[in-house]
Amino acid sequence: MDSPFPLRKIIHVDMDAFYASVEQYDNPALRGKAIAVGGGHRGVVSAASYEARKFGVRSAMPSKTAKEKCPHLIFVPPRFARYKEISRKIREIFYEYTDLVEPLSLDEAYLDVTENKKNIESANQIAKEIRQKIFEQTGLTASAGISINKFLAKVASDINKPNGQKTIHPEKVEKFLEDLPVEKFYGVGKVTANKMFSLAIYKGKDLKNRSFEDLTRLFGKSGAYYYNVVRGIHNSEVKPNRIQKSVAVERTFFEDLFDEQQINEKLENLSQELHQRLQKHQILGRSLTLKIKYKDFSLFTRSFTKEEYFTSPEQYFATAKKLWELRPFDKAVRLLGLSLSHLNTEEKKQISVQLKIPFEDFE
């Protein structure tokens, strides 16, 4: 594949049903059973085992819906300290091969292995070794995608899940993208996919036939992204120092809240918790957002941005109360959340320089 840009060797590693798999590994009685992490009486599913996914249970699904789809579903409370502990072990394995590791969450990351610490030519071999070490050290399985950029590696990692990997070689990128259904393109959600279907855009080749002007007219800024990625152009580098953009806390309540005094108590508690998190990491921010989810699952958010940084829980609480007063509905509340953005982490950002190495033997 001809490209004016340096071709890299990028691996996307994605743990298989991470939270649920941890619970099944730690508790053998749960293995082979349909389980959901989180949920319970009023919450939503944080993660579902593959046994539960067969019944249509998915993350972010209300627990009531999940139970209707899978009556024998077992709900397990989340143990985030345990997930973080295992995630650290997995990242240590990544760093055995490269320092260019960009974590996306506890259970997935990009690795640039164009140059690597073990001088292994084959990115495919590196991915195999990493997955094997993860299994040996944690008992968990991972899937991987390998290709010339982050977009393709991300798409590839989903192809042979669970416990598999897929390499998209440079000379096969064009054909792969032309045959790829548009709903499989990373960044194309259900709404966008349906819009594309209405325009007779079903596969990459259909997307490729559209001009840059046509796509930007139809999809705005995203149109330029679609125009490039379908041609294998995605030049975002693996960023080992991802800059945190926001800090958030939220609570789903066992009983719906309607009383003003209860709301104020919860907002005050959230303000204290948010402040503690920020202090721990020496983070300040200027923009506070209140999130409200009502009993009927409708969502409302409203933000306030200051010229100077927030510095105390009292400031968060006072602002949160003012944002609460701007709510459009007087309905029972099932969730409240506060998040802070426009952080001082932006000021601390360091420019990471990534080596541009000629792409030699990929396999």
Image (spheres, rainbow, N blue to C red):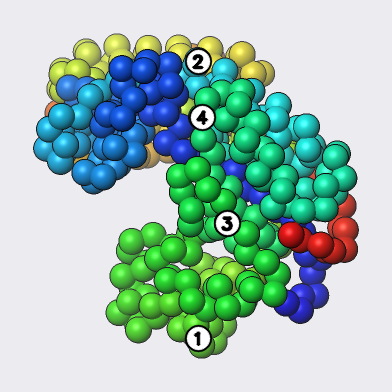
* Residue drawn at 30 percent across, 79 percent down: 198
Judged left or right of residue 243, residue 97 is right
Count neighbours of disc 3 (C-alpha within 10 A) and say few if under 14, some if 14 to 19, many if 20 or more: many
Q: Nearer the viewer, residue 305 or 117?
A: 117
Q: Which residue is mark 1?
A: 210
**Residue 271 spot, x, y in % from top left:** 43, 17
**Residue 332 spot, x, y in % from top left:** 14, 28
Q: Earlier in the sequence, mark 3 or mark 2?
A: 2
From the image, state whether disc 4 or disc 1 is nearer to you. Answer: 4
**Residue 165 vertical position relative to residue 267 in the rendered view, above or below:** below
Count neighbours of disc 1 (C-alpha within 10 A) and say few if under 14, some if 14 to 19, many if 20 or more: some
Circle 2 SS class: helix
From the image, state whether disc 3 or disc 2 is nearer to you. Answer: 3
Q: Which residue is mark 2?
A: 81
Q: Earlier in the sequence, mark 3 or mark 1?
A: 3
In the figure, residue 58 lies in which quadrant?
Answer: top left
Q: Which residue is mark 4?
A: 140
Residue 60: image tag: none
Q: Earlier in the sequence, mark 4 or mark 3?
A: 4
Q: Earlier in the sequence, mark 1 or mark 2?
A: 2
